[in-house]
Image (tube, rainbow, N blue to C red):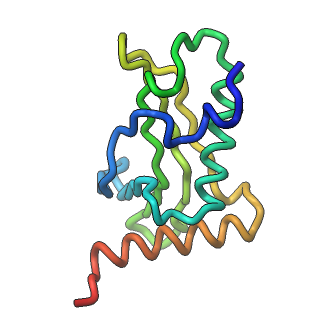
Amino acid sequence: MFNKEECQYTNFRLETNKMEFDISGENGILISIPFVNDTPQCIKDKLNSIIYQEMNKKTDIKYMPCGLLLCARMQVLCYNDKEHDPRYLMSVVITDTIDYSTNIDINIDIFSEISDFRNEFISYCQYQVNKLLFPIK
């Protein structure tokens, strides 16, 4: 069993720290936003809670978090058609750095969360995308 302090996202090797854009299916764009120092604390707390829960569900994880690779992202899935609203997700993938096997791969739909958290998450994602695409000089 891992304790909550061991499962803080900062204890892992972090995979990336830049925003990424990707094609999702035929009609969508996936925007992936990394966790960084200025990420709101409530979002970091949610990430840490997910990591703690998932790490303790797995009995086959052999290493402490510092020996594992964490790819944690806030994601926005935007569709090209007007029929679908954007989806907001938190993606957590934890991989063993020795054999590169995936121990945890989970996506949390933010719309299933309480409204205060959901609103903070969406606002932060919008802010990060706007900051990158429309910088104020």
Residue extending farthest to the front is 5
Quarter of the figure with residue 136 = bottom left
Camera-side residue: 110 or 52?
52
Camera-side residue: 115 or 43?
43
Camera-side residue: 117 or 25?
117
Camera-side residue: 56 or 21?
56
- Counting labels gives 0
Residue extending farthest to the right is 114
For this view, does 105 lie left or right of residue 115?
Answer: left
Q: Is residue 39 above or below residue 126?
A: above
- Residue at horizontal 55%, vertical 53%? 89
The N terminus, quarter of image: top right
Residue extending farthest to the left is 137
Percent across and percent down for residue 5 are 65, 36
Q: Is residue 48 above or below residue 12?
A: below
- Residue at horizontal 71%, vertical 29%? 3
Quarter of the figure with residue 134 = bottom left
Percent across and percent down for residue 93 are 48, 33
For this view, does 7 lie left or right of residue 97?
Answer: right
For this view, does 99 lie left or right of residue 44?
Answer: left
Percent across and percent down for residue 69 are 41, 29
Percent across and percent down for residue 109 are 63, 51
Q: Is residue 92 above or below residue 80?
A: above
- Residue at horizontal 56%, vertical 69%? 122
The C terminus, quarter of image: bottom left
